[in-house]
Image (tube, rainbow, N blue to C red):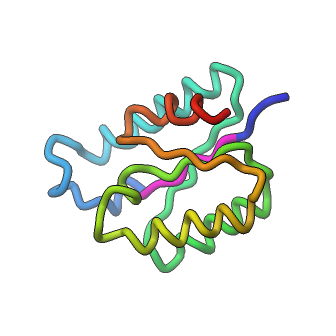
Amino acid sequence: MTKKVLMVGWHPSVVDYAKYPGLTPERLEGALRSDEAALNAAGYAAEIGFIRDGETAMDQLAEALAQTSYDVVLIGAGVRKDDDHFLVFEKLVNLVHAAAPGAKIAFNTGPTDSEAAIRRWA
């Protein structure tokens, strides 16, 4: 059975890159797409669920969780590690817990280790 994976994180167009020296929208998306491709090549059904702001993030995630039963939901480090987004992170975790109680929740440390985070739980 193919494991279904959702990788949730900020859309590269809305990230404050002043907080992440050397990171650009292109590098961020490229790293995330690379992990997504590696997971799909390894037999997972992985997809990225970009969020654009804290106001609509819950609706976006709730819709995704209602449409598909995921085995693992990864919440990206850009949401988790940035104190400015702490409440968004907390809400996302609680939404996954409530809407997809069978899904494992994973966390990466940056845009280049999403695959490793997923593999820990899938």
Towards the viewer: 24 or 106: 106
Give the left or right position of residue 75, taking residue 39 as reference. left
In the picture, measured across the screen, residue 14 lies left or right of residue 115, that is left
Queried whether the magenta region covers residue 7, the answer comes back as yes
Where residue 86 appears, x then y in whole percent?
A: 38, 69
Q: Residue at x 40, y 57 (%)?
A: 80
- Residue occupying image coordinates x 22% and y 43%: 23
Q: Relative to 105, say whether 34 is above or below.
A: above
Q: What residue occupies the far top of the structure in this picture?
A: 42
Rendered image quadrant of residue 14: bottom left
Q: Quadrant of the N terminus?
A: top right
* Residue 121 quadrant: top right
Q: Main secondary structure of the magenta part?
A: strand
The reply, left or right, for residue 96 in relation to residue 100 is left
Task: Give, as a single range, the part of the protein colored magenta.
Answer: 5-10
Can you say which quadrant of the picture contains the C terminus? top right
Query: Residue 95: horizontal and vertical position, in percent?
Result: 64, 68
14 or 4, which is in the foreground?
A: 4
Identity of the residue drawn at 49% across and 80% down: 55
